[in-house]
Amino acid sequence: MSETSNSVSSRPYSATVGQASRPQPASLADILERVLDKGIIVAGDIRVNLLDIELLTIKIRLLVVSVDKAQEMGIDWWRNDPMLNSRAQDLEDENRALRERLQEIEGPSKGEKGSS
């Protein structure tokens, strides 16, 4: 004698035979991949008012995307940021040295003349 039983799976998200499959919950890696591929923007403003006088305004803009997507959007600030790029730091040092040298050649500026 053979037994046939309809057993219920112990996993709540697994599809059973004969039922339409439900969307499976995404793993953290899947979610992260989607966010980096498509991008996510969080924007907000914080305002502090006292008796209808604006004392402080903070604008917050957060963009989370992959580097490829950011470049596709025309965003590449990390290439020239001296804190993130050693080449940019070298350029900043060179510019500072050139400004100092130009200052020596041209002499003191008008604001510095006759200040004694």
Image (spheres, rainbow, N blue to C red):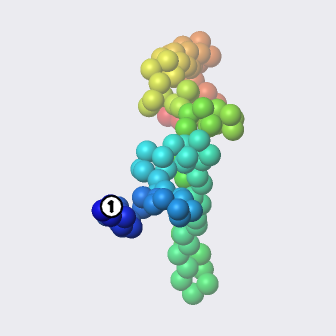
Image check: 37 left or right of 5? right
Q: Residue at x 47, y 24 (%)?
A: 85
In front here: 9 or 51?
9
Compared to residue 102, the image places residue 16 above or below, namely below
- In percent of width and height, residue 48 lies at 53, 75
Q: Residue at x 59, y 12 (%)?
A: 105
For the question of whether residue 57 can be seen, the reply is no
Q: What amino acid is found at the position of numbered circle 1 in the picture?
A: Ser
Compared to residue 45, the image places residue 68 above or below, namely above
Determine the residue located farthest toward the front in the rendered image: 1
In front here: 29 or 75?
29
- In percent of width and height, residue 80 lies at 56, 27
- In percent of width and height, residue 35 lies at 55, 48
In front here: 53 or 16?
16
Q: Which quarter of the rendered picture does the N terminus lie within?
A: bottom left
Count of numbered circles in the view = 1
Say which residue label 1 marks.
2
For the question of whether residue 46 can be seen, the reply is yes
Which secondary structure lies at badge 1? loop
Compared to residue 38, the image places residue 80 above or below, namely above
Q: Residue at x 42, y 61 (%)?
A: 13
Image check: 49 left or right of 29? right
In front here: 43 or 83?
43
- In percent of width and height, residue 100 lies at 52, 18
Q: Residue at x 58, y 66 (%)?
A: 45
Disc 1 crowd rating (10 Å Cα; few below 14, some 14-19, many 20+) is few
Q: Quadrant of residue 10?
A: bottom left
